[in-house]
Image (cartoon, helix red, strand yellow):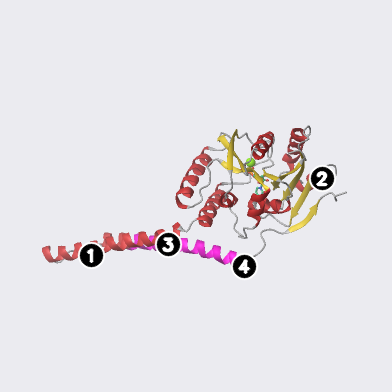
Amino acid sequence: MNNPYLLSVVVPVFNEADSIDLFINRIFSVFSNQTKFVWELIFVNDGSVDETLGNLLNHQVHYPQIKVIDLSRNFGKEAAITAGLELAHGNAVVVMDVDLQDPPELILSMLDKWQAGFEVVLACRTNRDSDSWLKRISANYFYRIHNILSSPKIPSNVGDFRLMDRAVVEALKKLPETHRFMKGLFSWVGFKTTTINYSRPKREAGTSKFNGWKLWNFAIEGLTSFSTEPLRIWTYIGLVVSLSSFLFALFIAVRVLISGIDVPGYASIMVAVTFLGGLQLIGIGVLGEYMGRTYIESKRRPIYIVRKIFEHTKP
Ligand code: UDP
Ligand code: MG
């Protein structure tokens, strides 16, 4: 390509006052000497309550590349990414975290792959040493279970850090759902995809915004957004349970015929009652999960609300 193309970098930030200076210094030093592309850096302030917005605006006034979308409250990372993608104009768009766990240097290799014809370039972490033991194990199981139940599959060890062609971004913008499990949506749209490996470093500053409970809910979100198997499985569990109780009833009847009236078994009745009760509650819970989702989607609320966009006016 001879004409410089436009690269958009979308960065969601939530209470990241300590990370912003480091991030901006690093990405500007990576991109300063190149002439192949012009670029814009879009920060989405996801309702931070610390100095994040002030810090961002201090930089924004000096650099015409920087745009800041200020959301009206914390809508979550998925919604923040959606907001960023909607404002990005680039021929290629990169989504990344602000904490430098996604090294900006990698973007240059992603761009090479993109120019070689790939529409999606994923960054795959070859080690998760920077994650806790529990997070590694649970992530591993999440990907496995998700990929058994849902299609299309999502690649494991791939986060939101990726480059997308304009066509991919346009496709994503057409997906209207309020519940946005971005990893699932990204793979749902398809396109010609390749992967580059990197080893994920530790956070440079600040703390992780995802604790165990948030991640658990995130996993449920992922499963129920992309699979209806958990609903159907109850048909089979129900069939198996009722078939076994029917066989058990037969067994009791035959035993009574052969050896006369039995002493009634308190224990077996309690087990049957509590087991079936539990099973029913789980079944209702699964139904509730999906019903809640339908309810929320049916309101058709916007995914995020913008308070203000800060950008340099074009000359
Ligand atoms: N983030 C966000 N909204 C949220 C939570 C997180 O925009 O509600 C941003 C956060 O500022 C960071 C990125 O998402 O840029 C990844 O968050 P974090 O590093 O805490 O996640 P981890 O790397 O621990 O999975
Ligand atoms: Mg991080």
Residue at left offset 59%, top offset 67%: 298
Residues packed near mark 1 inside 10 Å, few (<14), some (14 to 19) or many (20 plus): few
Q: Is residue 275 visible?
A: yes
**Amino acid at pointer 2:** Gln
Q: CA distance from mark 3 to mark 2?
A: 51 Å
Is residue 274 something that shows in the picture? Answer: no
* SS at circle 2: helix
Q: Residue 299, which numbered label?
A: 4
Residue 103 picture location, percent across and down: 67, 35
Which element type, helix, strand or loop, lies under badge 4?
loop
Residue ID for mark 2: 60
Q: Amino acid at mark 4?
A: Lys
Among the two numbered marks 2 and 4 on one chain, the one whose residue lies closer to the N terminus: 2
**Residue 72 falls in which quadrant of the image?**
bottom right
Identified by mark 3, the residue type is: Gly
Q: Nearer the viewer, mark 3 or mark 2?
A: 2
Which region shows up in magenta?
A: 273-299
Category of crowding for the residue at label 3, using alpha-carbon neighbours closer than 10 angstroms: few (below 14), some (14–19), many (at least 20): some
**Distance of mark 1 from mark 4, alpha carbons?**
47 Å
- Give the residue pinned by disc 3: 283
Label 1 vs label 3: CA separation? Answer: 24 Å
Residue position for label 1: 249
- Residue at screen point 63% across, 46% down: 209
Q: Nearer the viewer, mark 2 or mark 1?
A: 2
Q: Which image quadrant: the N terminus?
A: top right
Mark 2–mark 1 Cα distance, whole angstroms, equals: 74 Å
x and y percent of residue 179 in the render? 59, 58
In the drawing, does residue 305 fall left or right of residue 143? right
As helix, strand or loop, the secondary structure at mark 1 comes to helix
Residue in the image at 13% along x and 66% along y: 257
Label 2 CA crowd tier, 10 Å (few <14, some 14–19, many 20+): some
